[in-house]
Image (spheres, rainbow, N blue to C red):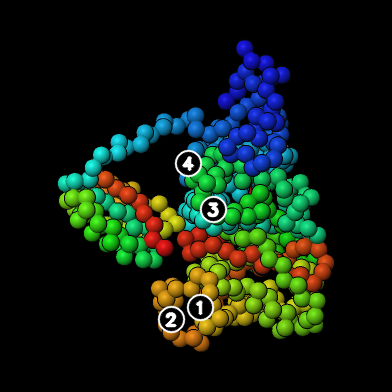
Amino acid sequence: MGSPAKVDEFEFFLEKEWSDGFPVVTPTEARVRWMLTGTRREPEEVVGPIPPALEIATVRTVAIHALMAGCKPAYLPVVLGGIQLILREEFNMGGVQCTMHGVAPLMIVNGPYAQKIGLHGGNGCFGPGFRANATIGRAIRLILLNLGGGISGRASATVFSSPIRYTACLTENAAGSPWESLAVSRGYAPADNVITCAMAENPRLHFDDASTEPGRLLTGIGDAMTAPGSWNMWFVSDLVVAMSPQHAKLCADAGMSRADVVERLSQLAVRKQSGVKYGGNWRPERARAMGIDPDDENALIKAVKDPQRLHLIVAGGNGPITAVCHGWNETSRFVHGSYEI
Amino acid sequence: MTSDLGFIDPTAGGSKARVALAPRPMDLAGKVVGLLDNTKEQADIIFETVADVLRSRYGVAKVIIRRKEAFSRPATEALLNEMAKEVQVAAAALGG
């Protein structure tokens, strides 16, 4: 009956409730076969149920969404690896699919395969402009929207959402970093292909073109990591800090390792309770839940309760900026793992 | 998924049976009502107040309040089953 000419495929997909608002690459059988050349896995292999709707993602349906998002077949292993990771129980993707918050699962991809496929960690790495970053993250989002049903105003109660929900995928600036990668810092080998995912808000840019030594630099970044209204202040949750190579070099030149900077920032990202209590999401119950007397104005509230939850990366181009991405709540814990290529 | 369109429509939903909404009771008199506390702050205060009103104004026989483990996670199967056995009407509700 119907002929392709009668349906405008761009409008067809733009009108879908699960559309992200942009056109997609029309998924034809031939194109999906092409996309599936990017993996050795069987098309019907189950990847897992996507919450909250719990539609089952298979390798084939992931490939269809990767195709629609604009991926090359070479990106498919990263999309598959990312989906597999974000479905881990401790990451609580279902909670974020429904929350009022606007965080997204930020994928930090380390290892040689990220370099090979052109994932970008330099100038403008949060986008726009870089196909691998843009389309891998978009594929994940389309899966969350369509198979997961995490649609704003429906299953998702998100108040504002956030531009980071269009795409959230990058690598580190390996060439510009004075340190080992995030993955290597967690015990992986440099040759391993690893994804780390943490729930993250949009990056907030912290300019510091004045500091000439790490003490002042990290004091400022630490302050940017604390904020009334951020859940990091009241929950043990994740926080991503992306230092530009210039900021990282300032620390490294003074003899600081990556772990030293993580430790120092964890100590400096702190406010007295009096500074976070007269606005934002302070409640006496929340202070008490952290073992803090709500009446003690001088009690210290740390943005980073556990240094493992501070994900320090070196990314971006040259310049005096560090990007701070606040996190979500204590029901999500970051995940990392190697993926199959 | 493929059709006369000439391309694939991967819209989810086709593979699962749809579950109809439970029939809504016309009145609550004599019924056992369950309230599911999502653990957000002050939910307990709100629920106790609502429970009083349900009993005094709507003739509800009994109100059972149960608490999830965390507001950002679904209630466990065991908790849902337990509530399903005990109550005739259930409401999931927010504190905050």
Q: First in sequence, mark 3 or 1: give its number.
A: 3
CB within 8 Å, label 1 to label 4: no
The chain to which mark 3 is attached is A
Q: Considering the image in quadrants, where does the C terminus of chain A appear?
A: top right
Q: Are marks 3 and 1 on the same chain?
A: yes
Q: First in sequence, mark 2 or 1: give its number.
A: 1
- Amino acid on which the number 2 mark rests in the picture: Pro
Q: Residue furthest front?
A: B57
Report the residue at 70% width, 45% height from top.
Answer: A135
Instruction: Give the camera-side residue of A257 and A288.
Output: A288
The answer to whether residue A273 is above or below residue B34 is: below
Residue A238 image point, x, y percent? 56, 65
Report the residue at 66% width, 35% height from top.
Answer: A14
The chain to which mark 4 is attached is A
Measured Cα–Cα span from mark 4 to mark 3: 16 Å
Instruction: Give the camera-side residue of A254 and A148.
Output: A148
Q: First in sequence, mark 4 or 2: give its number.
A: 4
The answer to whether residue A207 is above or below residue A103 is: below
Residue A243 image point, x, y percent? 73, 69
Residue A32 image point, x, y percent? 67, 30
Q: Which element carries disc 2, helix, strand or loop? A: loop
Question: Is residue A245 shown to the viewer in this render?
Answer: yes
Count up the numbered dots: 4
| Residue A277: image tag | 1
Q: Which element carries disc 4, helix, strand or loop? A: loop
Q: Which residue is mark 4?
A: A53
Instruction: Give the camera-side residue of A328 and B36.
Output: B36
Which quadrant of the view contains residue B49? bottom left
Q: Which residue is mark 3?
A: A158
